[in-house]
Amino acid sequence: MRRGLDPDGCAAVPGFTTDMLESKNEEEEMSTTTATRPHGVSGVKGFSLIQLFKAGGFIAGAILIAFGVVAIAMGFNGRSTVRDSLGLEKIVGSDDMTPAAIKKEAQEAGLTGITFPTKSVAGQSIDTGAEAKTFAEYMRIHALESTGGLTYAEMGRFATADGKAIGTNDPAKAVTDESGQPVSNGARNIWVTETALTTALNVSYMAEQLALFGTVVGIALLLSGIGFIVLAYAGLQRRPK
């Protein structure tokens, strides 16, 4: 079968010329699409995210610094409140509030199994949480000396004729007053007063420790906030390629 000739005089191969033209047209379309596609879209989007992260770093740092400053201020204010409140009570340690003196008194009273304070507050004004805690420890020993080593739960509600601190919970065995009512156990009442005072003193110590903890946390937040801002600023100095 004789093949036809193309306009240039060359033998025409069936399907060859058409395929070549279609391929050429596809390449031209791809080139046109590539040429008209906006460059840097993905780059602009990435740059915007980077800027967002950097701005977030500055904002987070500022918030941490603000919280840190507030926490430090609250810590110092709490510490000052505790010390001012203790100072208003005008508490002064008695002469026997030394480790050596209190041990001697406890031995003379026949007390055993007691943990003795290790610090002295004799003659000192009690105006700090640590001093209040130490004063409370001495108060407990004084209360034990007054009750013969008995605690509140070990004593009865009413006083007995023998005058012992242990007392009784039986009204029939209790000493009565002029109206015939049982007399309350004075030794037991000592513990009520001692517990109220030592609890207040120990709460003062705890409050001062919490104030100290708040101050430490505030410093940590402050330093973290500064670190965030430094990192964000360092990242801002780097120019995207």
Image (spheres, rainbow, N blue to C red):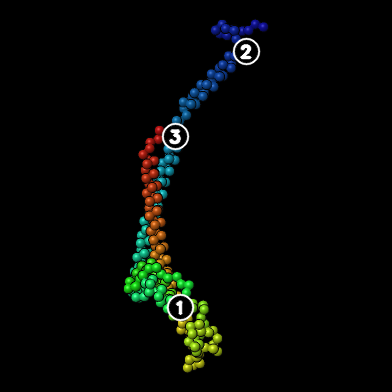
CB of mark 2 within 8 Å of CB of mark 1?
no
Specify the amino acid type for callout 2: Pro
Q: Which residue is mark 2?
A: 14
Nearest to the observer: residue 234 or residue 100: 100
- Residue 67 percent location from the top left of the image: 39, 55
**In this view, 73 is above or below 29:** below
Q: Is residue 175 left or right of residue 13?
A: left
**Which of pointers 3 and 1 indicates the residue nearer the eye?**
1
| Disc with the residue nearer the chain's start (3 vs 2) | 2
Specify the amino acid type for callout 3: Gly
CB of mark 3 within 8 Å of CB of mark 1?
no
- Residue 17 percent location from the top left of the image: 58, 14
What residue sits 51% from the left and 24% below the top? 30
The quadrant where residue 6 appears: top right
What residue sits 38% from the left and 36% below the top? 239
What residue sits 56% from the left and 16% below the top? 20
Q: Secondary structure at mark 1?
A: loop
The quadrant where residue 145 appears: bottom left
Nearest to the observer: residue 86 or residue 49: 86
Q: Secondary structure at mark 3?
A: helix
The crowding category of the residue bearing disc 3, from other C-alpha atoms within 10 Å (few below 14, some 14 to 19, many at least 20), is: few
Q: Which residue is mark 1?
A: 110
**Which of pointers 3 and 2 indicates the residue nearer the eye?**
3
**Which of pointers 2 and 1 indicates the residue nearer the eye?**
1
Residue 43 marker? 3
- Residue 143 percent location from the top left of the image: 44, 77
Q: Is residue 78 left or right of residue 18?
A: left
What residue sits 57% from the left and 7% below the top? 10
